[in-house]
Amino acid sequence: MGLPIRDQLKYWGVAAAVFLVVLWFVGDVLVPFLLGGAIAYFLDPVADRLERLGLSRTLATALITVAALLIFVIMALLVIPTLVNQAINLVETAPQLARNFTEFLTARFPSLLEEDSTLRNSITAIGATVQERGGALLNTALASFASLLNIILLFVIVPVVSVYLLVDWDRMIAQIDALLPRDHAPTIRRLAAEIDDTLASFIRGMGTVCLILGTYYAIALMLVGLQFGLVVGFVAGLITFIPYLGALLGGVLAIGLALFQFWGDWLSIGLVAGIFALGQVIEGNVLTPKLVGNSVGLHPVWLLLALSVFGTLFGFVGMLIAVPVAAAIGVVARFAVAQYRASLLYQGTEPGSSFDEDPF
């Protein structure tokens, strides 16, 4: 005979409280292990496909590891230094861009920006603030990242954890399944499968879409000759997981930079705008339907709320677990609604009871 519902809720509530307390106190220590687990989860379908082609799990993991190392070396030698340099230069040139914008408005709309006007002073102050705060923010972010994921954690622990978890992923899942409460195992398996489908669609699907679009934006903008094209493409691709936001912010930033750089060269400005328009067409008609699917189960507002709440409460590690937790809460909430609709509380006690009668 299973435990009463009240006792089960008590035990699961205590387990959840312990998990949150541990996360609060040792969250930073868990970061490399969470990153390693995320990498293993992301690459598990690749390893499964290689196994279906005849490779052993160990050989498949070794092949994936070699490919990942080659990609990382190429990124470290070619892309990352350029990305950092362009980001620093963009922050440093923000005041000059603000002055250029002021001169542009003054030349074409002199009545809007008179000398010592509020709007003129505001634009100048914004440029100075971006330079001052932006540089400090960038340096702080790099320093925090270095302190959070130092060289040993980044280059040793994360790859080692991801490799070990990738090798033992199927065995680990089987052991967890064996520990499930027997009374609730079928329901937990079904909910876990729905959570996995949601995460797979979002993390793997949207991660691939972000990577493809970010690479496309960066290469296309650099081929057009736009300064800071790599940074703009990286930013636009990184936030593509929020519908339209990546293209909107990236497009506004890229077109704004293009207006200063190519003023009068309307062909180049049109090419920059066309790059983002084409990116939206490709994302909406090809990438998202093929890689993500029509129903992900994570509304953008719900996702932003989860990122904000967990990021505020638990810092960087909270942001890492925000998406899985949001997916799990969404699946459990839909399950609870389905249970409620099937209950007597919703349907009433009898078919002819007053609860079933239309009061209107």
Image (cartoon, helix red, strand yellow):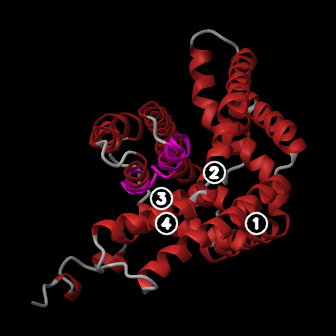
Which residue is denoted by mark 3 in the rendering?
A: 331
Residue at 13% x, 85% y is: 358
Secondary structure at badge 3 equals helix
In screen coordinates, is 148 left or right of 267?
A: right
Tell me, yes or no, whether the highlighted magenta stretch contains residue 334. Answer: no
Q: Residues within 10 Å of mark 2 (few under 14, many from 20)?
A: some
Residue at 41% x, 66% y is: 103
User: Measured from the top left, where is residue 150 in percent x and y?
Assistant: 86, 48
Which residue is denoted by mark 4 in the rendering?
A: 99
Q: Residues within 10 Å of mark 4 (few under 14, many from 20)?
A: some
Most foreground residue, 66 or 277? 277
Q: Which residues are magenta?
A: 227-254
Amino acid identity at mark 1:
Phe
Which residue is denoted by mark 1 in the rendering?
A: 19
Q: Residues within 10 Å of mark 1 (few under 14, many from 20)?
A: few
On residue 89, the disc is 2
Q: Residues under labels 1 and 2: Cα distance?
A: 43 Å
Q: Nearer the viewer, mark 4 or mark 2?
A: 4
Sequence-first tag of 4 and 2 = 2
Q: Residue furthest top?
A: 54
Residue at 52% x, 57% y is: 327
Amino acid identity at mark 2:
Asn
Is residue 204 visible to the viewer in this orientation of the structure?
A: yes
Most foreground residue, 22 or 347? 22
